[in-house]
Structure formats: C-alpha cells, structure tokens
Amino acid sequence: MLSAVPIFIKIGQRSSPTCHICLLNDDYEHIIMECSKFVPERDILFNELYRFLPAPFHFQQIIFSK
C-alpha cells in the first residue's frame, strides 16, 4: 500500500498515521477513495475518470493505469 503519512510525519506536518477527520489509516487510497474531506475533489476526479476507465473503478486502476 502506498502511504503518504510517513513523509508527513518525518517533516513534522503530522504526528499520527491516522486521518484526523475519519480516524482511519491515512494512506493514498484513503485520501483518493474514502476521506470525507475530499468529497468535492473526488467527484471532479471521478467524473473525469469515467471518460477513460470503466466504472466501477478501483484505486489500483486510478494509480497504475496507462
């Protein structure tokens, strides 16, 4: 799993690997697919992705598709 948290902790921006909004593990998949903080951004992203990827799509398709 790709995780953004270790770099944020290392540079002092975060103190925990848990999302402070959802209280779940805060990794890239959580940010892109689940976190309630990013619902408007996710809607925009998914509307654009529907043009290129068959729905429903998964995190791995978003990150690793060509």
Image (cartoon, rainbow, N blue to C red):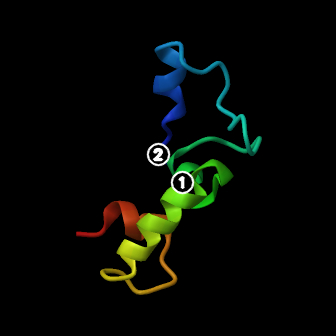
Residue at image position (55%, 59%) is 40
Is residue 64 positioned above or below 35 on the image?
below
Secondary structure of residue under mark 1:
helix
Residue at image position (46%, 45%) is 2
| Residue lying furthest left | 66
Q: Earlier in the sequence, mark 1 or mark 2?
A: 2
In the picture of the structure, the residue carrying the numbered disc 1 is: 29
Q: Quadrant of the C terminus?
A: bottom left
Residue at image position (60%, 21%) is 14
Q: CA distance from mark 1 to mark 2?
A: 8 Å
Secondary structure of residue under mark 2:
loop
Q: Say which of 47 and 22 sits in front.
A: 47
In the picture of the structure, the residue carrying the numbered disc 2 is: 2
Does residue 1 appear to the left or right of 65 in the view shown?
A: right
Image coordinates of residue 8 in percent, x first then y, are: 50, 24
Q: Say which of 29 and 41 sits in front.
A: 41
Residue at image position (37%, 74%) is 49
Instruction: Give, as a three-letter code, the residue at label 1.
Output: Glu
Label 1: few (<14), some (14–19) or many (≥20) C-alpha neighbours in 10 Å? some
Image coordinates of residue 7 in percent, x first then y, are: 46, 25
Instruction: Give, as a three-letter code, the residue at label 2.
Output: Leu
| Residue lying furthest top | 12
